[in-house]
Image: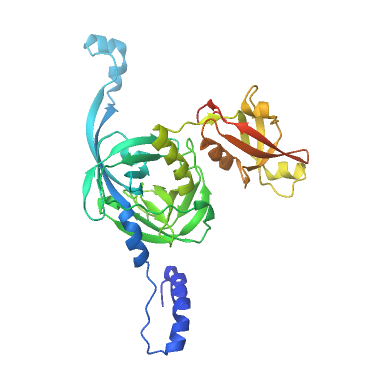
Amino acid sequence: MLPRPLLPLALIVLAAIAPDVCAAGPAAAVALPSLAPMIKVASPGVVNIATRGTLTERVRRNPLLEDPYFRRFFNVPDGELVRKRQFQSAGSGVIVDAQNGYIVTNRHVIENASEITVTLLDTRHFPAKVVGSDEATDIAVLKVSEPHLTAMALGDSSRLEVGDWVVAIGNPFALGHTVTVGIVSALGRTGIHPRGYEEFIQTDASINPGNSGGALVDLKGELIGINSAILSKDGGNIGIGFAIPVNMVKAVMQQLIQYGAVKRGIVGIKLQDLAPEAAEALQLVNSRGVLITAVEPGSAADHAGVRVGDIAVAMNGVSLDGATQLRNALALVRVGQTVDLRLLHEGQARTVSLKVNTPGTADGW
């Protein structure tokens, strides 16, 4: 009997081959389905990234040395003790523009690196430089000057559903190109890096150290996420990995290529998830939407007529489920662009246009 985890996959295989078996008879040879053709197309777009650099660390010293009288008596100099340490690390990346040599990876993969080397599937290797990086989304763009690159096709992460099959391709533990398979376990995960902008794809495809910056692809071989983090007690895979949705990656990547950084703006509102109790009090059919809890005087939101107590139910025609979704969407809007918010207030619906034109910070909505 097959182990329980393999039963669903076995049923899929049997369903796929059953008609052929019935038609050709039990003795006929059966060609089992395989991911190999798709992986052969997608894998050249994934690269291994090796980095070298120097870290400056504060050295913990004896508590006695913190006593100013002790330092004076033994002539210990003031100031923190620091040391420099050389490091090497490995990660992954995805070629998104073969003509211009652009590669997307995680910011933490190349952080503090003074030397970055990219290795292709065909073992060619060459140096890369950082075009730009964004700490809030943990995305970075590299550039290489090499011909004959193969870019990976970019998919649409908004079309993902829980249960979709996905494949992770990367460089775990510096082993080189490695492929693992799983499903989308959940969507819109938050709380992994609370200070950043999050809307992670959760997957049980095996992701380990070194997979960071690598590709999460669908069965068409299109990039639908950049593998970024794992939930683990010992650093190894336990079947809970997280990837940044490719739609977020696209928006950040465009700004990094154009400006070298993400130019965020503020619209002057504070957000909160709409609790079921509040939705019931407001006689709403469901609790989908975002409650506006504060409007900054003189801000774009104030000028547009946004009011405390408004419920944002859509942005640019896309329905809103919660505050994180709206916060992430606003964070990816370029300064100078206009967004349309669909609002409800005391049963009345209206649409307002906000021009994002004031540079801000991650906490300034």
Name the residue: 46% across, 54% down. Answer: 155
On the rendered image, what quadrant is the N terminus found in? bottom left
Q: Where does residue 357 sit, x and y in percent of width and height?
A: 55, 27
Q: Nearer the viewer, residue 204 or 234?
A: 204
Q: Where does residue 125 sit, x and y in percent of width and height?
A: 21, 47
Name the residue: 49% across, 53% down. Answer: 156
Identify whether 84 is placed above or below 23.
Answer: above
Identify whether 129 is placed above or below 42.
Answer: above
Identify whether 221 is placed above or below 337.
Answer: below
Kindly tell me whether residue 66 is visible in this rendering: yes
- Please identify the quarter of the rendering in which residue 76 is found: top left
Identify whether 250 is placed above or below 353.
Answer: below
On the rendered image, what quadrant is the C terminus found in? top right
Q: Nearer the viewer, residue 67 or 130?
A: 130
Q: Where does residue 187 sit, x and y in percent of width and height?
A: 52, 52
Q: Where does residue 321 sit, x and y in percent of width and height?
A: 62, 46
Count of residue discs: 0
Name the residue: 38% across, 82% down. Answer: 30
